[in-house]
Amino acid sequence: MVARITSAFIALVAATAAAASAIPRTDGSSQCNTGSIQCCDTTTQPSDPAAQLAAGLLGIDLGSITGLVGLNCSPVTVVGVGATPSCKQQPVCCQNNSVGGLLSVGCIPVSL
């Protein structure tokens, strides 16, 4: 009987220790080399007519861009303590987000 109680107690302590070690990441997991991870309404190829139109209106040449173009982007947000970042579309890391989120260039998909 004592052995069963001891085994149950050890299992409970081990489970509690494992659960307690699940600490939220604060190492910049919502960051990439060029700033914050972006959540864009649309990601497309630089040759896409919508991307070309938006870039043309902003005076940006997409001819030498590698990667995707993000349209209507905003930084990925984290809501609540211990919450993970969320994005309803594919989160991306972009080389240039300097147009206020309307157009981000050189984007690559990332996992959160």
Image (tube, rainbow, N blue to C red):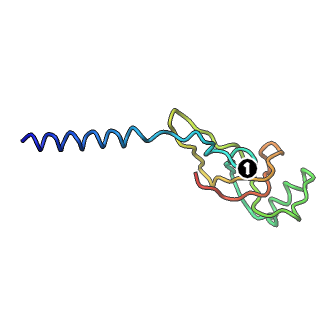
Give x and y (percent) for residue 58: 90, 50
- Would you place residue 69 above or below residue 82 in this image? below
Q: Which residue is mark 1?
A: 33
Labels in figure, total: 1
At 37% across and 41% down in the image, what residue appears? 19
At 30% across and 43% down in the image, what residue appears? 14
- Would you place residue 100 above or below residue 91 in this image? above
Give x and y (percent) for residue 25: 54, 41
Q: Amino acid at mark 1?
A: Asn
Q: Is residue 40 left or right of residue 104?
A: left
At 66% across and 58% down in the image, what residue appears? 109
| Residue, far top | 81
Q: Secondary structure at mark 1?
A: loop
| Residue, far right | 59
Q: Residues within 10 Å of mark 1 (few under 14, many from 20)?
A: few
Give x and y (percent) for residue 31: 67, 45
At 53% across and 43% down in the image, what residue appears? 84
Can you tell which quarter of the image residue 76 is in? top right
